[in-house]
Amino acid sequence: AAARLDAYARAHGLETRERLGLSLDDPELTPPSRTRYELAVLTDDRAPVAGGISRRVLEGGHFAELRAVGGVADVARAWDRLFTEWLPGSGYEPGDGPGLERYLAPPDFDTWSGFDVVLALPLRRARHAR
């Protein structure tokens, strides 16, 4: 998937645009074989959609952000910190939409290393005060 997205970005002059990862499932609840993760490149409405590439519009809103650097285990620990350390006392709960990973540098998806990402958790005000 990463190679296909890279080829698409090069073919359409988008190679310098920001890359995102979208976590569509909760890995605590969804078996690994069913966990969905999408890779994306930021574009505008003029970029053509072809070759297995689809368009998704991301909604704005409030997000909690945390930077993670290292391997895939470091990224997982950072997500865990957002959910278990920051979120419970924040007055917020997870909002609608996927968790986002903004890639500050291209990772090595073959070895699952070299990540430098900003994690972005969509938020809404907590419905029940604790």
Image (cartoon, rainbow, N blue to C red):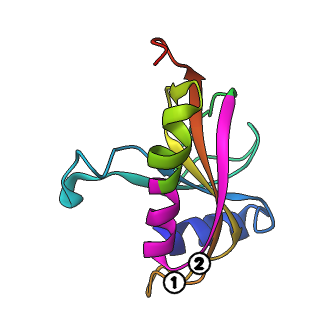
Q: Is residue 52 visible?
A: no
**Neighbourhood count class around disc 2 (C-alpha, 10 Å): few under 14, some 14–19, many 20 upward:** some
- Labelled disc at residue 126: none
- Observer-nearest of 73 and 53: 73
- Disc 1 marks a residue whose amino acid type is Ser
> Measured from the top left, where is residue 12 in percent x and y?
74, 61
> Measured from the top left, where is residue 62 in percent x and y?
68, 29
State the image quarter where residue 11 is shown: bottom right
In the rendered image, the residue lying farthest to the bottom is: 111
- Observer-nearest of 114 and 108: 114
Magenta stretch containing residue 67, yes or no?
Answer: yes
Magenta-highlighted residues: 62-80
Specify whether 42 is left or right of 89: right
Q: Are marks 2 and 1 in contact (CB under 8 Å)?
A: yes
Give the residue pinned by disc 2: 107
Specify whether 85 is left or right of 44: left
> Measured from the top left, where is residue 79 in percent x and y?
49, 55
**Neighbourhood count class around disc 1 (C-alpha, 10 Å): few under 14, some 14–19, many 20 upward:** some
> Measured from the top left, where is residue 112 in percent x and y?
45, 81
Rounded to the nearest angstrom, the CA distance separating label 2 from label 1 is 6 Å
Dot 2: element: loop
Q: Is residue 68 visible?
A: yes
Q: Which residue is pictured at 50% across the width and 55% down the height?
A: 81
State the image quarter where residue 26 is shown: top left
Give the residue pinned by disc 1: 113
